[in-house]
Image: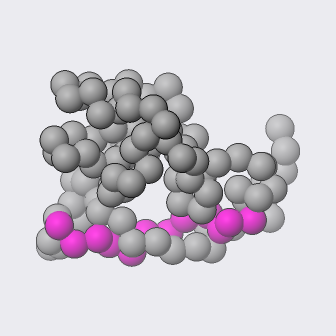
Amino acid sequence: MSDLSEFEITDYAFMLVWPPFPNTDPDTPQLMRFHGPALCEHQGINCCIHKPSAHGMAALPQVWRQDLRIVVRLCGHNQHHPDPDDLSAAGARCDCHCGCCLVTV
């Protein structure tokens, strides 16, 4: 296992959050803290924040699911699909009924 201690949470991005933070508008993106881009560059991987791949849901809005602690994509059917570029979501099962997550490039 590599030592990643030099890569701190140094980057910020606006993202919708579900369930919403208390006393916030659920349709207003919130400022979230993330790792800096150096971590993605160091590991040479795709990242849902800094280096998204060209997957079929890349144009859909991102949502931070604080209950699951993963980034999901919100499709036009109002369904949450695990973001393929979020390593925390690897292996996460999608319970949608629309099939938008099956779209490929």
Q: Position of residue 85 (x, y in %)?
A: 54, 44
Q: Residue at x 46, y 71 (%)?
A: 13
Q: Residue at x 45, y 32 (%)?
A: 104
Q: Residue at x 29, y 59 (%)?
A: 17
Q: Residue at x 21, y 60 (%)?
A: 20
Residue closest to the eye, 48 or 19: 48
Q: Is residue 89 above or below residue 10?
A: above
Q: Position of residue 76 (x, y in %)?
A: 19, 47
Residue closest to the eye, 74 or 25: 74
For the record, the magenta segment spans: 27-38
Residue closest to the eye, 44 or 64: 44
Q: Position of residue 25 (x, y in %)?
A: 15, 71
Counting the numbered discs, the total is: 0
Residue closest to the eye, 26 or 68: 26
Q: Is residue 32 above or below residue 1?
A: below
Q: Is residue 48 located in the magenta-colored stretch of the structure?
A: no
